[in-house]
Amino acid sequence: MNYFFTEEQLMIQELARRIAREKFVPVRAELDEKGEFSWDMVKILRESDLFGVYLPEEYGGLGGGVTELCLAVEELSRACGGLSLSLAATALGTFPILLFGSDEQKKKYLPALASGEKLAAFALTEPEAGSDAGATKTTALRDGDHYVLNGTKCFITNGSVAEVVVVVAMTDKTKGSRGASAFIVEKGTPGFSVGKEEDKMGIRTSSTSELVFEDCRVPMENLLGREGAGFMVAMKTLDQSRPGVAAQALGIAQGALDEAVAYARKREQFGKPVIAFQGLQFMLADMATQVEAARALIYAVCRAIDAGEKRISRESAMCKLFASDTAMKVTTEAVQILGGYGYMKEYPVEKMMRDAKITQIYEGTNQIQRNVIATQVIREAVSKK
Ligand code: COS
């Protein structure tokens, strides 16, 4: 379908598609097997200027928005849902600075994030604060002109490779979610270390790790927004970044659909290519319809965000929910279409199925997305009375 993207957007799409095909495809299986992050692939993304597509030109970006980010993430994920994360998770860690940073903070951090010289991460989740993000235990206590951070964050995408991490911590435990604050913490700050590196089911070509803060002194100028605004910073960051997870899911689904069609055209059974059987055609038709519906929703939401729409929680949650459920369904069907071969590591669809699963879980489980959507639906109904 023609989405009437601008020429610049089509160039970003084409560039990301080419990198995915020429650079990611040849290495993805080996990196997946080893569970390895690839700096070589980061270098390629840096050289292609993709890290800055959604950032303002004054900070070295290309001046686009979430539409450009999602186009790049979708195409890269079509080849490998894990390798696209050096970019997508950097965007997640960059959004709080872009949305809530002071001029000084933006000038200091955004250029290196726009060029990809530095990667970023967003550290919200803790062992006991997953869906219940308000239950954060990490503390940040004021001491002179510093905050002293103590606590452990877990499941942090880009955790071991990020040089800039936005951390949510409690500056006042007595105030619940209104006592949380967000900080920019740089790699190398004494007291900040990377803990356990996770061995995952999918997105094995990305880094996911624990981050540990032990009397980590962060200068007070690294506070993002005001003290006590951390929960709101986190929620608005997620509103902005969830379309990126949706785009990752969409790319994985499209990649699996491409593989299923290519295989079904070649594979012969009962004397003809299996694509000639209506049972299989109906499966492909449903997969293609779901993929296109996800794409239409994602880019409609992206356009609304880029046009300045501020009330985006519901729509952002909807596209993450729909696209990730689609990715799980479509990759599972792709494995089915490839049959015994689909179950083997020789073909990429089993990896795509494993990679798809996380999109239903991170940046808020799909149950949390439904909570967010339902809350808005109820609020709107009540306000109409
Ligand atoms: N934008 C701005 N403010 C928001 C907001 C949003 N999208 N969502 C909530 N808030 C505000 C509320 O208005 C409320 O403000 P006040 O204290 O001023 O009234 C405050 O935040 C607390 O909101 P709420 O009571 O709804 O918070 P809950 O503790 O019930 O949690 C959910 C809400 C479950 C939606 C939230 O915890 C969440 O998104 N959890 C998932 C976290 C997640 O995605 N983790 C993934 C890891 S990060 S990669």
Image (tube, rainbow, N blue to C red):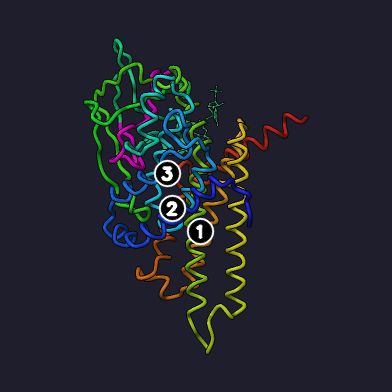
Q: Sequence order check: which comes first, mark 3 or mark 2?
A: 3
Question: Is mark 3 in CB contact (under 8 Å) with mark 1?
Answer: no
Give residue 335's mark: none
Q: Is residue 128 visible?
A: no
Q: Residues within 10 Å of mark 1 (few under 14, many from 20)?
A: many
Residue 189 falls inside the magenta stretch? no
Q: Nearer the viewer, mark 2 or mark 1?
A: 2
Residue sitting at x 62%, y 61%: 289
- Residue 292 spot, x, y in % from top left: 60, 57
Using the numbered discs, state the Cα–Cα distance from disc 3 to disc 2 in whole angstroms: 10 Å
Name the one closer to the observer, 19 or 296.
Answer: 19
Q: Is residue 37 left or right of residue 61?
A: left
Q: Residues within 10 Å of mark 3 (few under 14, many from 20)?
A: many
Residue 156, horizontal then vertical, whole percent? 35, 40
Q: Looking at the figure, which quarter contains the C terminus?
A: top right
Does residue 108 lie above or below 125 as drawn? Answer: above
**Is residue 264 depicted above or below 135 in this figure?**
below
Ligand 1 under 8 Å from disc 3 Cβ: no
Report the Cα–Cα distance between label 3 and label 1: 22 Å
Earlier sequence position, callout 2 versus callout 1: 2
The residue under label 2 is which amino acid type? Leu
**Residue 103 visible (yes or no):** yes
* Residue located beneath label 3 in the image: 50
Residue occupied by mark 1: 253
Q: Nearer the viewer, mark 3 or mark 2?
A: 3
Disc 3 versus disc 1: nearer the observer: 3
Q: Residue furthest bottom?
A: 271
Label located before the other in sequence (3 or 1) = 3
Q: Are marks 3 and 2 in contact (CB under 8 Å)?
A: yes
The residue tagged with tag 3: helix, strand or loop? helix
Which residues, given as a range, are shown in magenta?
Answer: 152-175
- Per the image, the residue denoted by label 2 is 76
